[in-house]
Image (cartoon, helix red, strand yellow):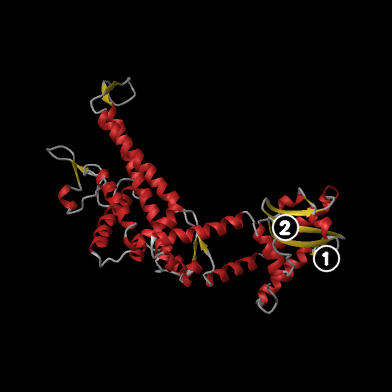
């Protein structure tokens, strides 16, 4: 519970303003537990703000009493208003205001809800302070979207492969075109459009791969104990892709360095193509006139050793890039990183920073089997909490 000795002078003013906004809403004294606990959910209570804001306002800032957990109840706060006592509870089916003979009290409950809404607006600086305190202690969870992001990449890559295979299978199939449909009238190869669509899919798949790595590298770094505080994660999240890669892999290792160089090249070419409207930054979209016809300004000899190129006139080998990516994905989940795959891709459990700091993740990362045992225990705890099975 927060009191005036732990709040700054500014937050004391915030607390007082929130208390004034509540008006006659006071901590409730329950005299008939049976009637109140057997009460029904009000319709007016459905307009309450998010459950955590209500809890932080009433219990954290203003010191209302929390009766604690119960059967399918996370917390319960009695409040009194104009001679009526209500329970504000976070139950399995959501937050609500509960009372006996609730139909006759809907108007009064609506006034309570409006008062709470106004008080929450006044308390916003306190909520920001709470969040900053949690970040300073690294007492936070980091959302794990690794599996969903990877599935997006796999969907696009698999769809590309199917489209490319269809283009190959129909390489000699032609269709007649109608006047005005294209720049000329006559037979057109079906594979032409299929190859174009396949290329679009490949570019989208490659982009999805980098999106996944931007996310998963941070999570792997946490599980490996390379970053353990909210401040470190904030800095890493805002850093370049290369910094995230180096947080996971040691570039002194030959294979890690080879993948880094090749993937950096692919990423550069993809960004150069997409971020600059397919013009590129070095004249890739230009053709100069000559006796040989139109010639690309960016001639192949200027590409040097770079294999993965985007831009008309110099072919970008999407297949080569995707083969490289698939090989790298296997490398990501090898050796000491294998247990991380089990956690990040077989579950949607968040990363809990306190576990990174206290050695919990270090113990689970010893082997895939140890990680599976940890996940089973952790998933059970999350399931019980979600079911409010206290």
Q: Position of residue 160 (x, y in %)?
A: 33, 39
The numbered mark, 1 or 2, whose residue comes first in the sequence reads 1
**Height in image: 278 above or below 357?**
above
The secondary element bearing badge 2 is classed as strand
Q: Position of residue 215 (x, y in %)?
A: 42, 57
Q: Nearer the viewer, residue 216 or 312?
A: 216
Q: Residue at x 26, y 21 (%)?
A: 187
Q: Position of residue 198 (x, y in %)?
A: 32, 37
The residue to which callout 1 is attached is 29
- Residue placed furthest toward the right: 83
In which quadrant of the rendered image does the C terminus lie?
bottom right
Visible residue check, residue 82? no
- Residue placed furthest toward the left: 291
In this rendering, position of residue 36 left or right of residue 166: right
Q: Nearer the viewer, residue 230 or 303?
A: 230
**Within 10 angstroms of label 2, few (less than 14), some, or many (20 or more) residues?**
many
In which quadrant of the rendered image does the N terminus lie?
bottom right
The residue to which callout 2 is attached is 89
Q: Nearer the viewer, residue 344 or 148?
A: 344
Q: To which quarter of the image does residue 316 belong?
A: top left
**Height in image: 177 above or below 26?**
above
Q: Position of residue 323 (x, y in %)?
A: 27, 47
The secondary element bearing badge 1 is classed as loop
């Amino acid at each position: 519970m927060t009191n005036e000795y732990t709040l700054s002078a500014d937050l004391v003013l915030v607390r007082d303003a929130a208390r004034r906004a509540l008006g006659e809403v006071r901590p409730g004294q329950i005299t008939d537990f049976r009637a109140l606990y057997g009460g029904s959910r009000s319709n007016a209570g459905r307009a309450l703000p998010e459950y955590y804001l209500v809890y932080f306002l009433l219990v954290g800032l203003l010191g209302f009493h929390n009766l604690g957990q119960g059967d399918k109840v996370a917390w319960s706060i009695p409040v009194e208003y104009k001679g009526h006592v209500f329970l504000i509870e976070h139950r399995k089916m959501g937050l609500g205001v509960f009372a006996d003979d609730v139909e006759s009290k809907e108007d009064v409950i609506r006034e309570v809800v409006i008062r709470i809404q106004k008080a929450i607006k006044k308390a916003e600086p306190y909520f920001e302070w709470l969040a900053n305190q949690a970040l300073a202690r690294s007492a936070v969870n980091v959302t794990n979207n690794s599996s969903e992001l990877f599935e997006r990449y796999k969907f696009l890559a698999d769809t590309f492969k199917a489209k490319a295979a269809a283009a190959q299978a129909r390489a000699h199939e032609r269709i007649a075109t109608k006047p005005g449909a294209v720049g000329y009238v006559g037979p057109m190869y079906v594979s032409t459009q299929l190859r174009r669509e396949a290329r679009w899919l490949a570019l989208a798949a490659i982009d999805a791969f980098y999106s996944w790595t931007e996310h998963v590298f941070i999570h792997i770094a946490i599980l490996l104990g390379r970053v353990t505080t909210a401040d470190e994660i904030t800095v890493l999240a805002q850093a370049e892709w290369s910094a995230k890669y180096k947080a996971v892999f040691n570039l002194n290792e030959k294979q890690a360095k080879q993948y880094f160089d090749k993937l950096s090249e692919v990423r550069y070419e993809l960004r150069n193509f997409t971020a600059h409207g397919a013009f590129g930054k070095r004249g890739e979209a230009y053709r100069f006139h000559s006796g040989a016809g139109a010639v690309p300004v960016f001639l192949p000899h200027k590409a040097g050793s770079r294999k993965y190129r985007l831009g008309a006139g110099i072919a970008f080998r999407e297949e080569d890039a995707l083969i490289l990516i698939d090989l790298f994905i296997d490398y990501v989940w090898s050796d000491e990183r294998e247990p991380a795959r089990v956690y990040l891709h077989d579950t949607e459990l968040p990363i809990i920073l306190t576990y990174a700091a206290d050695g919990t993740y270090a113990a689970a990362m010893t082997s895939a089997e140890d990680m599976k045992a940890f996940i089973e225990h952790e998933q059970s705890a999350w399931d019980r909490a979600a079911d409010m099975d206290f």
